[in-house]
Amino acid sequence: MSNQVTKTTKSKIACDGGTASSHPRVWLQIEPSKGEVVCPYCDAKFVKEGQGQDH
């Protein structure tokens, strides 16, 4: 399990657990009303910040 928090300006993020806790790559969607999403495999948290343009 990870306590990692990653800040991003994008709404769609790929997570593969990194090298320490690898898992299949999953695509996660940050809902605008929540502003964050947690990976169901490794519990890494992704927090959207700023007003960056999504790609």
Image (cartoon, helix red, strand yellow):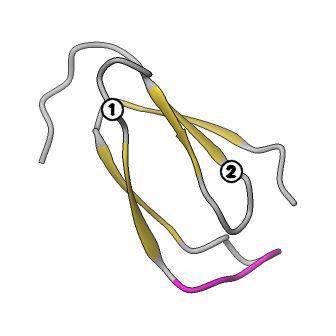
Disc 1 residue crowd, few under 14, some 14–19, many 20+, Cα 10 Å: few
Q: Where is residue 28? Give x, y as percent.
A: 40, 56
Give the amino acid at mark 1: Glu
- Residue found 29% across the figure and 23% down from its top: 32
- Residue found 15% across the figure and 38% down from its top: 54
Horizontal relation, residue 1 to residue 6: left or right: right
The quadrant where residue 6 appears: top right
Which residue in the protein does label 2 denote?
44
Q: Where is residue 52? Give x, y as percent.
A: 20, 24
The quadrant where residue 35 appears: top left
Which residue in the protein does label 1 denote?
31
Q: Where is residue 43? Give x, y as percent.
A: 73, 53
Q: Quadrant of the N terminus?
A: bottom right
Q: Where is residue 13? Give x, y as percent.
A: 38, 54
Instruction: Give the secondary structure at mark 1.
Output: loop
- Spatial separation of the CA atoms under disc 2 and disc 1: 16 Å
In depth, the one of 40 and 44 nearer the eye is 40
Query: Is 17 within the magenta?
Result: no
Horizontal relation, residue 39 to residue 22: left or right: left
Q: Is residue 39 above or below residue 37?
A: below
Instruction: Give the secondary structure at mark 2.
Output: loop
Q: Is residue 33 above or below residue 10?
A: above
Query: Is 21 within the magenta?
Result: yes
Taken as a whole, is the magenta stretch helix, strand or loop? loop
Question: In this picture, which residue range is highlighted in magenta?
Answer: 20-24
Question: Label for residue 46?
Answer: none
